Amino acid sequence: MRVKCILCDKIETIRDETPLAKRLRNRPIHTFMCDTCHTRITKKTEKHLASDAFKLYRKPKRNLF
């Protein structure tokens, strides 16, 4: 199956039997990102999370018991 990265428009080939290929075939909302773009975004996100300027607003976990 030929897929296109949503960020860099690089075309790659993935096997038809993989879960990723099935997900892309059956649900058009899912998008493909190549490994280089994925690692680049992961590094930038980790760097951003490590800075003090980033605040993540999550609901506090409550104990039910």
Image: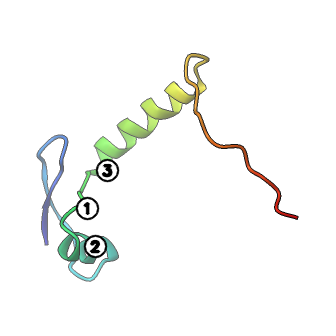
The first of marks 2 and 1 along the sequence is 2
Q: Determine the secondary structure under disc 2.
A: helix
* Residue at the right extreme, as displayed: 65
Q: CA distance from mark 3 to mark 1?
A: 16 Å
Q: Which badge, 3 or 1, is on the more N-terminal residue?
A: 1
In the rendered image, residue 23, in percent from the top left (x then y), is placed at 28, 73
Residue 1 vertical position relative to residue 40 in the rendered view, above or below: below
The N terminus lies in quadrant = bottom left
Question: Mark 2 near mark 1, Cβ–Cβ under 8 Å?
Answer: yes
Secondary structure beneath label 1: loop
Q: CA distance from mark 3 to mark 2?
A: 17 Å
Decide: marks 3, 2 in contact (CB < 8 A)? no
User: Horizontal and vertical percent for residue 58?
Assistant: 61, 40
Q: Nearer the viewer, mark 3 or mark 1?
A: 1
User: Hey, which quadrant is residue 60 in on the image?
Assistant: top right
Taking the image as shown, residue 13 lies to the left or right of residue 39, namely: left
Q: Amino acid at mark 2?
A: Arg
Q: Is residue 13 positioned above or below 19 on the image?
A: above
Kindly identify which numbered label has been placed on residue 35: 3
Q: Disc 3 marks which amino acid?
A: Asp
Picture coordinates of residue 22, whole percent (x, y):
25, 78
| Amino acid under disc 1 | His
Q: Residue at x 18, y 74 (%)?
A: 25
32, 58: nearer the viewer: 58
Residue at the spot of label 1: 30
On the rendered image, what quadrant is the C terminus found in? bottom right
Q: Is residue 52 above or below residue 2?
A: above
Is 46 positioned to the left or the right of 41 in the image? right
Say whether disc 3 or disc 2 marks the residue closer to the N-terminus.
2
The residue that disc 2 covers is 23
